[in-house]
Image: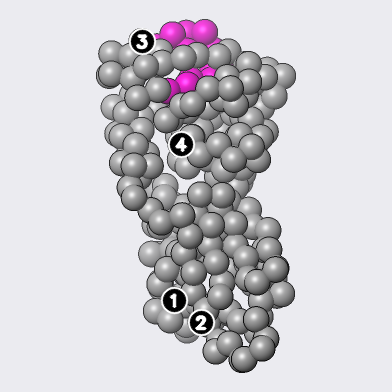
Amino acid sequence: MKLLVVEDESKMLELLSRGLSEAGFEVDVASDGAAGLQMALTNSYNLMVLDVMLPFIDGFEVCRQIRKQGKTTSILMLTAKYEIDSRILGLDSGADDYMVKPFSFAELLARLRALVRRGTQNWPRYIEKNGVRIDVLNRKVSYSSTDVVLTATEFDLFKCLFEKSDAAISRARILEEVWEFPFNGSSNIVDQYVGYLRKKLTPLSNVVSIETVRTLGYRMVFNPIERGTK
């Protein structure tokens, strides 16, 4: 299992490299964002542990560029920042998970194992309903010749509602499935992202919509396709 660690603090880099190697990973390391990005794009890694505060290119931009190039490496981001906006930015950049320093190495290993399990599941390349198609690998949504450009979090929210269409999903369940980290604040973040998603789905409003289920959460509803309109 090949893993890339990108971390500029030499002591932390050494500890992570040694600990992950002892845990059975084949570990490569980089100490700045530019080197890490180059290694990620020219090699095939199963996993990547990526610090946010890096010289030359920060972790957010490294993550964005990796996803832009179509790389599906599972990325766990590390940061000393604890603000919720920072975590959202990391996930929106394309990260799969997020840990705040200082952290437990045992928890880091557990999260990496979870990413491995998630990455090896036999997901279909495409999911399609009522003419709306999700490209799971490239994380794209389309209908006929219309492409909907979504951020990473918007895509995960769309996929969550899409897979359970016509079923009401609570805000708590959405938080658990989409954000995938302990969240102690208000669930208004779900309402905020549903608002973003509804705006992005305006071109498909005659095909799919997101309904508010009072006191519970949301559900995605597909409208019947009229003949000759697709």
Q: Is residue 155 visible?
A: yes
Q: CA distance from mark 1 to mark 4?
A: 27 Å
Residue ID for mark 2: 221
Q: Which residue is mark 1?
A: 165
Q: Which residue is mark 3?
A: 18
Q: Earlier in the sequence, mark 1 or mark 4?
A: 4
Q: Are marks 1 and 2 in contact (CB under 8 Å)?
A: yes
Task: Check disc 1 and give the amino acid type.
Answer: Ser
Residue 11 magenta-drawn? yes
Disc 1 crowd, CA 10 A, few/some/many (<14, 14-19, 20+): some
Identify residue type, mark 2.
Val
Residue 229 relative to residue 165: left or right: right
Give me the disc on residue 204. Answer: none
Q: Nearer the viewer, mark 3 or mark 1?
A: 1
**Magenta stretch contains residue 33:** no
The type of residue carrying mark 3 is Arg
Q: Secondary structure at mark 3?
A: helix
On the image, numbered disc 4 is attached to which residue? 74
